[in-house]
Amino acid sequence: CSRACYEKWMCNGDRVTGRGSQWAKIRLEVIAMQPFCTMCGDSNRLEVHHIVPFRMTHDNSKANLTPLCKKHHKIVESITHDIEFSGSSPEHMKLILGNMLSERAAVSAYMVKKRNAQTRNVAD
């Protein structure tokens, strides 16, 4: 999707700018806990995604956050947008997206661990 499309469809509605005074610290803590994209295991240019959008709950808890690479952040935002506009409550969004992302994070963690082990074996 183009930037114009993103602005039209993803940024409509009641926007909340800013994530609070502790956002930079929280963001770094989330990335330190899981230094790879939940979806693909990439560790470059990580962004932190709110599972239930901040504008709906103002929830910056670590349970509502997950690291994503730029590519997957855009994809997950699109899914989030679809779920939100289907009329799902924040609780249902957390259940739907939280479970999907949690399961995917476990797979990505396994892939990262396996890749790191292979790298160590090659170096030996």
Image (cartoon, helix red, strand yellow):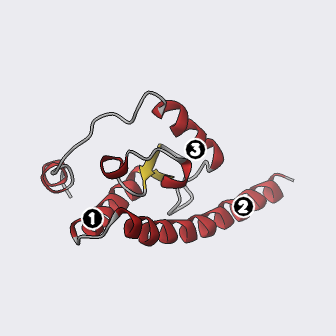
Residue found 51% across the figure and 39% down from its top? 27
Marks 1 and 2, the one that precedes in the sequence: 1
Q: CA separation, marks 3 and 2? A: 16 Å
Q: Which residue is mark 3?
A: 31
Residue 112 in picture, x, y percent from top left: 66, 60
User: On the rendered image, what quadrant is the N terminus found in?
Assistant: bottom left
Q: Quadrant of residue 91?
A: bottom left
Residue 120 or 83: which is nearer the viewer? 83
Residue 5 in picture, x, y percent from top left: 14, 55
Q: Quadrant of residue 109?
A: bottom right
Q: Which mark is residue 113?
A: 2
Residue 50 in picture, x, y percent from top left: 42, 51
Residue 31 in picture, x, y percent from top left: 57, 44
Helix, strand or loop at label 2? It is helix
What's the amino acid at mark 3? Answer: Ile
Crowding at mark 3 (Cα within 10 Å: few <14, some 14-19, many 20+): some
Helix, strand or loop at label 3? It is helix
What's the amino acid at mark 1? Answer: Glu
Q: Which residue is mark 1?
A: 84
Crowding at mark 1 (Cα within 10 Å: few <14, some 14-19, many 20+): some
Helix, strand or loop at label 1? It is helix
Residue found 47% across the figure and 53% down from its top? 68
Q: Is residue 97 left or right of residue 86?
A: right
Crowding at mark 2 (Cα within 10 Å: few <14, some 14-19, many 20+): few
| 1 or 3: mark nearer the eye | 1
What's the amino acid at mark 2? Answer: Lys
Residue found 48% across the figure and 71% down from its top? 100
Q: Quadrant of residue 122?
A: bottom right
